[in-house]
Each structure stands twice: as C-alpha cells, then as structure tokens.
Amino acid sequence: MLEHDVIIVGGGLAGCRAALEIKKLNPSADVALVAKTHPIRSHSVAAQGGIAASLQNVDRDDDWKAHAFDTVKGSDYLADQDAVEFLTKEAPEVIIELEHLGVLFSRLEDGKIAQRAFGGHSHKRTCYAADKTGHAMLHELVNNLRRNHVKIYEEWYVMELILEDSPLINPPQPPFVRGEIEKPLVRGEIEKPFVREEMEKPTKEAKGVVMFNIHDGHLQVVRSKAVMFATGGYGRVFNTTSNDYASSGDGLAMTAKAGLPLEDMEFVQFHPTGLYPVGVLISEAVRGEGAYLRNSEGERFMARYAPNQMELAPRDITSRAIVTEIRAGRGINADGSAGGVYVHLDLTHMGKEKIMSRVPFCWEEAHRLVGVDAIYEPMPVRPTAHYCMGGIPVNTDGRVRMNGNKLTEGFFAGGECACVSVHGANRLGSNSLLECVVYGRRVGRSIANYILDRTMPEIDEEKYLQANEKRIQDLLNQEGDTRINSLRQNFQDAMTEHCGVFRTEEVMTEGLKQIRQLIAKYGQIFLDDKQRQWNTELVEALELQNIIIVGEMILTSAIHRQESRGAHSREDYPTRDDRNFLQHTLASYSPEGVTVEYMPVVVTMFEPKERKY
Ligand SMILES: Cc1cc2nc3c(=O)[nH]c(=O)nc-3n(C[C@H](O)[C@H](O)[C@H](O)COP(=O)(O)OP(=O)(O)OC[C@H]3O[C@@H](n4cnc5c(N)ncnc54)[C@H](O)[C@@H]3O)c2cc1C
C-alpha cells in the first residue's frame, strides 16, 4: 500500500495551489497529487478571461467591499458572506503571489497588471493574460510543484474515496453565526442550526483513495492523513458544454457514494456565449472588451433585460435573455433569416488591433471551429453548460461537512468541486480562478496544520482492492447491447432538455423518469476493449457512472427548489422566495433515490434585496 501524509486528487489550479501551500509551510510533509490527466491538461488551463481582485490599477475607487457586494448580489444572495469576505479580502495578495511565482499577466502602459471589465462587476478588476489566463497560471503552478518536490501521479484514475466511521467527535461548527443583520425567516426544520444529538455522534473520516493506473491497468490503495478533492466540474452532464472531456464530476459522485451530501447542485451556470454549434467558450472578456449581442433584427437586445449593464449583465440574466430571444423567434439561421437557434456576438466595430491583442484566442476559436472571421463578421453563439456553483460542502478552511451540524475528519475539498459557498446561485465571471487560488491556499494551510497531530490511519487494503477489482472485471465481462457513447448521449440529451436554462416541475419530473430508465441500462453496457492497458473505454464507463449520479442529484435538487434564484429559473415559480428558500440544499444519494435537506445561509454584511442591473 502506498502512503503519503497528504493525497490531493486533482491537478488543476485548486489542487496545485493547495499542494504548494502545504510544502511552503511544512517542507518535510510528504504531499502527493494525483490526476487522471496530465496536470497541465486540467480544465483550468482553458480558462480565458481572467481573475478578479480589487488591485485598483485601473479603478482607484474599487475595494474588497465593492467586490464582495458584487459577488453577493451576483449570487442572488445565496453566497455565504463570511466565505465571500475571505475571497475578496485575500484577492489582491494572491495575485501578487502569483506574479512572484512567475505568472505573466498582461500590463498597463505604466507596467502595472492590467484589469478589464467583467459581467456583474461594478469596477474594472479582472486581471488577465490576454485570453489565456488559466494557461499562464497553471503552467507556473505546476512548475512550482516540481520545484517543491510534490510527488505527481499523472494519468491515474481515482475510483473510490475511502471514508469510514470515525471514533472522533468533532466540536460543533459555528458556521451560522450571523452579524447584525436580521436574517429572513427560514423553513421550520432548519431554524435550529445545531441539533445536539447529531453533534454528539461520532463522525466519518477519510483515510485514503483507491486509484487505477490508466497506463497498465493496476489498482493501488493510497492511505494518507488527509485527503483533498480538487476534481473540478461536471460540464459533461450536459450535451453542450464549454468543459473538457474530463469534467465528469468524479469527485462529486465519489463523495456522494461515500454517503456525504452535496450542496446546491441545482445551480448550474449556463455561459451565454458558447460558440454554436460546438459549445466551446467564447470568453466574457470579449464582451468586457466591448462586443455586442444582437438578435435577428440586428438589435442589441440586452437593453430590454439589463438596461444599465447591457452585455455585461451577470451570466444567468444574459443566458435567459438569449434563450428568450430565440424562443420569441428572434434567433438567427445560417442564411441570416430569423427563427434560428443562436444569436450574434458582434466584434466587428472593435477593430483588428484590439481583437488580436486582447482576445486573440477567441478569434482563433471561431475561425478554426466554425469558419468565422470575427474581424469582419459576427460569431454565432448560444448558452452552453459551463460551471458548477454547488459541490462538496466545506467550511472556510476547506473541511468537508458531514451535514449542517458537523465536519468529517481528514477530508478536504477546494476549487470548482467544492461549495464553500462564494458563488451562491450564480457565479460572477473571473471569481472562479480566484476561488481556486484563495481557497486553494486556505485549504493548503488548514491541511498543513491538520496533519501535525494526526497519525496514519489503518486501512483493510485487501477489502478495497477486491471491491474495485470486481467493479472493473464486472464491466469488462458484461455482455450487453448498450454502447457507452449512445447511453451517455441519451443521458446528456435528457438532462439538457429537462434541466436547462428554464425549468418547470412537469418537465423536470419527466426528466427524472427518463434518466431513471437510462440508469437501468447501465448494467447492459458492452465494452469492445477488454484489455487492462490504456483502456480509455473502461475509464469512460466509470466516468459515465459518475455523470449519471451527478445528473440525478442536480435534477432532484432542482425539483425541490420551488423558486427562481440566480441560475435556477423556474417558470412555475418565477420569483425568489427568501422566506422558504434563502438556504442551501443538501442532497444525499442512494441507489434508491436522492433525498434533500436544507442548511442556513450565512448573512453578515449585505441584506438580501431585489437584484437589478
Ligand atoms: C473554457 C473555460 C473558461 C473559463 N474561464 C474562466 C475565467 O476566465 N475566469 C474564471 O474565474 N473562471 C473561468 N473558468 C472556470 C475555471 O476555469 C474553473 O472553475 C477552474 O479552473 C477549476 O479548477 P479546479 O482546480 O477546481 O479543477 P480543474 O482545473 O477542472 O481540474 C480538475 C483536476 O481533477 C482531476 N480529476 C478529476 N477527476 C479525477 C479522478 N477521478 N481521478 C484523478 N483525477 C481526477 C483532473 O485530471 C484535473 O487534474 C473557465 C472554465 C472553462 C471551462
């Protein structure tokens, strides 16, 4: 059995930043990082537009409080405000640290880090490296991992989180202390934030993971004093997404299967400008630099939905506006006529020099993938599944919650797979890279402390090897007539059709029925490739299982939230309902179905108000 003081699953920005922090604070700690891709191929590398921080390089009157207010308002008041405070206060410092690590940000004439406008932000505060910000950041972080002797397991697929009952009783969590602001009433059962009997029960503890070597097909148990998940998002639950193929929600599904809840899974961000028909992202930076959205009549329709912020309204509002235009027959067809399924993103007034210096990669994407030269013609765009606001519930030190009352032992999460919650019901652009580095650093610190007085846990290695070996063999031996591709496509289509930008109870209930029928087909999957070495079909089969679990959790959480808030837009409940739903969903998985509870929102600075842009 392998062992390390810390095992971090995920080589994106969150995992790398955490690993670096642990090594910085405790150079002798034995830290390992495992990723199913090469770390540099993590989805973070694709981040384009930038990372927010109130550096005041462009807007002198910006500060962390303005950033915090924009974030909370953008979240439709569902973000936990203590977590937002850390995010926005620590932002300038983490940018300077990145700069010192070697990240090459774009510059102003005076040599300071450049900052651009982004949707929902009231000031120009998004720092960037042209439109390749994630690339610039991740490459430097991975270089620094090697320099700091972090052990990297690349192209290993983690199959299971080892989580067992723990004799420990952790002290009650004080996460729901509120400041002076009187919080609106919440549902009966969660008015008591702490349930004494729950607090006095022992908790669960993470002891390691089981992982599968994609090269040669062997299994390995790793035990560790702390496990961190930084496994990224789940865009592949939907048929059109900006995310890479690896974004299959593995960490979320493994956590749910281990018996822990997932928070706020109904909040899926659909980015307004996915390039049609491929779905890849055209960064919000393009609108930040001045591009317009136009319908089939050539009209800048955002004037009707967000007259002040126009194209720079938050993403939930802009995506709904685009879908509303398309539904009203003002979408565009390939021959330019009305009634089509996309709208135009128009850069033609910006000029070649600005386009090629500020957003060259977006120009290249449109040129290469759909043959559009954006200097002279508009790009076809429509919303694409982009970001996961919910995730593994954690406190502001990245410790994973058992439920609303207590924490697990030895288990941490950060980055997109975690829900701390700084994005609430809708994330603002450029706040996710920021979350990865601010909370990557915070989780790293908390792990560095945590392992100091923790002993290496005991694990029955054979039991875990056998169970996972059986899972693999069963898949290889299975004699069915269902192909992974078609089952995955049917599932993604069902999710997209029944749980998209606009939702109703009727449509979602039908969706749940359909996906439960598809789940039954998983047992009939047939794999062509029966080898153990480099069997990507086998890995896809394992990923599909996770995609399905995550999809079911999204749909069930969405059915239960009978209001419209942020990205969750219910046509049958069109208004926000703070009295009943100013609270976080905690959904728990079992093969029989998903159950839902609620947990209060932390309100410390800004009282919930109606959201207007
Ligand atoms: C196209 C695009 C552009 C974006 N642009 C911006 C932007 O400009 N600004 C911004 O703030 N945000 C942006 N985002 C969002 C942001 O990039 C992500 O939220 C963030 O990078 C996620 O980082 P992460 O470290 O949490 O996970 P990721 O970078 O997704 O990394 C996940 C890691 O987990 C590993 N992993 C997953 N499952 C397993 C498993 N079972 N076993 C082993 N390893 C596993 C993967 O191999 C990978 O290394 C963008 C997102 C996309 C898709």
Image: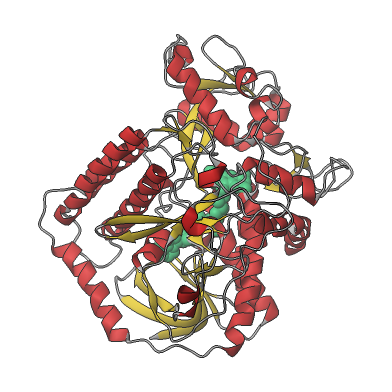
Q: Quadrant of the C terminus?
A: top right
Please identify the quarter of the rendering in which residue 476 is found.
Answer: bottom left
Please identify the quarter of the rendering in which residue 282 is found.
Answer: top right
Pinpoint residue 340: horizontal percent, then vertical percent. Answer: 42, 16
Query: Which is more toward the observer, 217 or 577?
Result: 577
Q: Is residue 64 visible?
A: yes
Q: Is residue 7 above or below residue 501?
A: below
From the viewer's perspective, tell me whether residue 39 is left or right of residue 101.
Answer: left
Residue plotted at (63% across, 79% down): 448
Q: How many marks?
A: 0
Query: Which is more toward the observer, 86 or 73?
Result: 73
State how the image is colored.
Answer: secondary structure
Pinpoint residue 548: horizontal percent, then vertical percent. Answer: 31, 51
From the viewer's perspective, tell me whether residue 603 is left or right of residue 475.
Answer: right
Q: Is residue 232 visible?
A: no
Pinpoint residue 540: horizontal percent, then vertical percent. Answer: 30, 55
Pinpoint residue 164: horizontal percent, then vertical percent. Answer: 38, 79
Q: Is residue 133 above or below residue 177?
A: above
Q: Quadrant of the N terminus?
A: bottom left
Query: Which is more toward the observer, 59 or 367?
Result: 59
Residue plotted at (48% across, 80% down): 200
Residue plotted at (86% across, 47% down): 111
Q: Is residue 429 above or below residue 164?
A: above
Residue plotted at (66% across, 83% down): 27
Furthest-front residue in this view: 188
